[in-house]
Amino acid sequence: MNHKAIIITGGAGFIGSHVVRLFVNKYPEYKIINVDKLTYAGNLANLKDIEQKPNYRFVKADICDFEAMLSLMQEEKVDGIIHLAAESHVDRSIKDPFTFARTNVMGTLSLLQAAKVYWESLPEKYEGKRFYHISTDEVYGALKMDGSLFTEETKYQPHSPYSAAKASSDHFVRAFHDTYGMPTIVTNCSNNYGPYQFPEKLIPLFINNIRHRKPLPVYGKGENVRDWLFVEDHARAIDIIFHKGKTAETYNIGGFNEWKNIDIVKLLISTVDRLLGRPEGADDDLITYVTDRAGHDLRYAIDSRKLQRELGWEPSLQFEEGIEKTVRWYLDNQEWMDNVTSGDYQRYYEDMYKGR
Ligand code: NAD
Ligand code: DAU
């Protein structure tokens, strides 16, 4: 498949910026159109190094705006869509579920419908087209501490408004394949970490707090387990799946890398302290156990053997190596952190932890 014009939605966000960077650098013959509304989570500073490339275009737009999506697809003769734009933070979804339904469900539907109208207007229709939807392992619900894994056949059982909205968007994508024959693909990935992640998520929030010697709010007992993947490994998987994945298939993406939250917190403290030349154990007392997240899923763990077996992808980094790289990046990019944590962020942070 030789795609010429690809829309990447949410390209100014955390994972999206890594995907845009990879595609712009690796495929100079493609035109990469980054569509992003620039919510609090979108930041064009994440793409400074590629913004002048001739094969890159940024369009500030809301994916819920059907007319804008359709005319952009027509104007750019878009033949591929990689859809990452979403509201992505579980804690925010607990406070404001409507925004999650709007963007994640209605936004995805608006993009699908625009692609349908545009592609069906062409003589070749869906031939050579691809709609690739990026989803999450959270749609599968929670695992027990029994070694079981989420496979592509695991039934959907979302618990948070975030995961319910993502599950609904996944269903719409598959419905557009089954009903209209749109060539779709869905992938469900585990927790990502790495540079450019907004500091509301565990790893960048805690790195920044350790640096500034602020409390580390560990939810519940810190025993919840997540399966962590370095963000560039996810971007590489997206590249492989976009080009070689089979239409209508689902692929799970994960690192076979399960960690209890409290163990990650200890690893972050020791890594930050070592890199800042602080004595061992200097910041252990920052750990503060707070009221648990409502509906907090106990454990996520992905079986990504299908992707490894069929498309030859595997994670490239050991977690300790990835964490070292990540901590160094945040410490070296304090200006980026200061910019994203100025203004509204302080208010959000105080509000989120009020009463915990
Ligand atoms: P993020 O919150 O960092 O970025 C989301 C981006 O989407 C931002 O740039 C934001 O401005 C943009 N956006 C939000 N609403 C929009 C709208 N209505 N129109 C256009 N743009 C809009 O998210 P992320 O962590 O990079 O996640 C990206 C995708 O990957 C999401 O779909 C998420 O569900 C999925 N995912 C994330 C993880 C993870 O660990 N972060 C894991 C698996 C899957
Ligand atoms: O599994 C994939 C998902 O991973 C993605 O779909 C989501 O977009 C992404 O946000 C992430 O969801 P989590 O809820 O797992 O990530 P978060 O970084 O918010 O939290 C990770 C774990 O750490 C979780 O068990 C909650 C806990 N936590 C989080 C924060 C922010 C704390 O204990 N304290 C905190 O302050």
Image (cartoon, grey):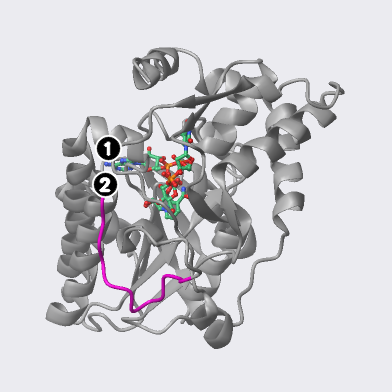
The kind of secondary structure the magenta stretch mainly shows is loop
> From which residue to which does the magenta span run?
148-159
Residue 197, x across and y down, in percent: 54, 38
Q: Dot 1 corresponds to which residue?
A: 93
Q: Residue at x 21, y 82 (%)?
A: 123
Tell me whether circle 1 and circle 2 mark residues in contact (CB < 8 Å): yes
Q: CB of residue at label 2: within 8 Å of ligand 2?
A: yes
Residue 266, x across and y down, in percent: 68, 36
Residue 317, x across and y down, in percent: 72, 60
174 vs 327, nearest the viewer: 327
| Amino acid at dot 2 | Ser
Q: Quadrant of residue 29?
A: bottom right
155 is within the stretch colored magenta: yes
Cα–Cα gap, marks 1 and 2: 7 Å
Q: Secondary structure at mark 2?
A: loop
Residue 160 - label: 2
Name the quarter showing ligand 2. Answer: top left
Question: Does residue 281 lie above or below 149 as drawn?
Answer: above
150 is within the stretch colored magenta: yes
Residue 122 in sight from this viewpoint: no
Q: Residue at x 45, y 58 (%)?
A: 300
